[in-house]
Amino acid sequence: MPPMDASALKDRLKALQAPLKARYRDDPGAALVTLTADGELDGSGIACRVRTATALAEAGLHPATGGDGSQLCSGDMLLEALVACAGVTLRAVATALGLDVSGSVRAEGDLDFRGTLGVDKEAPVGFRDIRLTFDLRTDASADEVATLLKLTERYCVVLQTLVSSPTTSVSVSVSA
C-alpha cells in the first residue's frame, strides 16, 4: 500500500478521532481509561520480565549498577517511552496542522548512580535532568514550528506525566 499524502493522512486522523472527541464531550467518564503494565519476578537473576503489546521484555541492572548490559535498563525504557510518545504526538499534531515534518527525537537523562546504590544518601535517586530534543526537517515557518512544539509539549502524555509528577502510590500483597 503506497504512503498517504499529507491531506489524506490529515483527513484520516480527523475521521478516526472525531467520533472519539464527540463521545468524550458527551460522556467525560468514557475518556477515563486505566492503562496497566505487568511484570513477572519469577526466574533467575535480578530481572523483571515486562509484557508489552508485542513482546516480553526483560529488564535488569544497568551496567553502572552491576548489570552486564544484556538486559533492558528501566531508565532507558523511561526515556524510550518519552521519545515514543513525543514522536507520535508531534506527528499527530503536525498532521492535524497540515505540516510536512520528518526528522528525529532524542531524550537524554542524567543519573547519579551513587543514590541508586546507596553510596551517598544525599545523592538523588532517579533522573536529575531530562532533555528532549527534536531535530526536524520541514518547510514550516518558525511560527508554525513554535506552534507544533507548544502543542506537542501540551499533549504528550509521557512528557506531561514527568513534568506534573502525579500522585503515585505503592502497595504490596503477600501470599505464601
Image (spheres, rainbow, N blue to C red):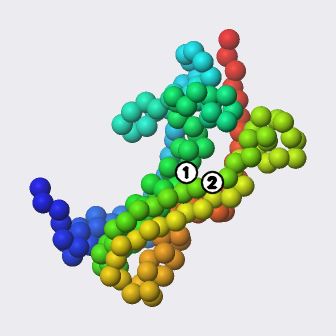
Determine whether the residue tagged by mark 1 lies in a helix, strand or loop.
Answer: helix
Q: Residue at 74% across / 41% down in the picture?
A: 113
| Residue 12: percent from left, percent from top | 23, 67
Determine whether the residue tagged by mark 2 lies in a helix, strand or loop.
Answer: strand
Q: Are marks 1 and 2 in contact (CB under 8 Å)?
A: yes
Is residue 29 shown to the viewer in this render?
A: no
| Residue 78: percent from left, percent from top | 56, 47
Relative to residue 95, is residue 161 drawn left or right?
Answer: right
Q: Residue at label 1?
A: 79
Is residue 58 shown to the viewer in this render?
A: yes
Which comes before the other along the chain, label 1 or label 2?
A: 1
- For the N terminus, the image quarter is bottom left
Q: Residue at label 2?
A: 109
Q: CA distance from mark 1 to mark 2?
A: 7 Å
Relative to residue 172, is residue 52 drawn left or right?
Answer: left
Q: Label 2: few (<14), some or many (≥20) within 10 Å? A: some
Quarter of the image where one finds residue 43: top right
On residue 58, which mark appears? none
Q: Residue at 67% across / 16% down in the picture?
A: 175
- For the C terminus, the image quarter is top right
Q: 20 or 161, which lies in front?
A: 161
| Residue 115: percent from left, percent from top | 79, 41
Say if 103 sits above or below 146 in the image.
Answer: above
Relative to residue 18, is residue 78 drawn left or right?
Answer: right
Q: Residue at 79% across / 48% down in the picture?
A: 124
Say if 96 sits above or below 164 in the image.
Answer: below
Say if 29 sits above or below 81 in the image.
Answer: below
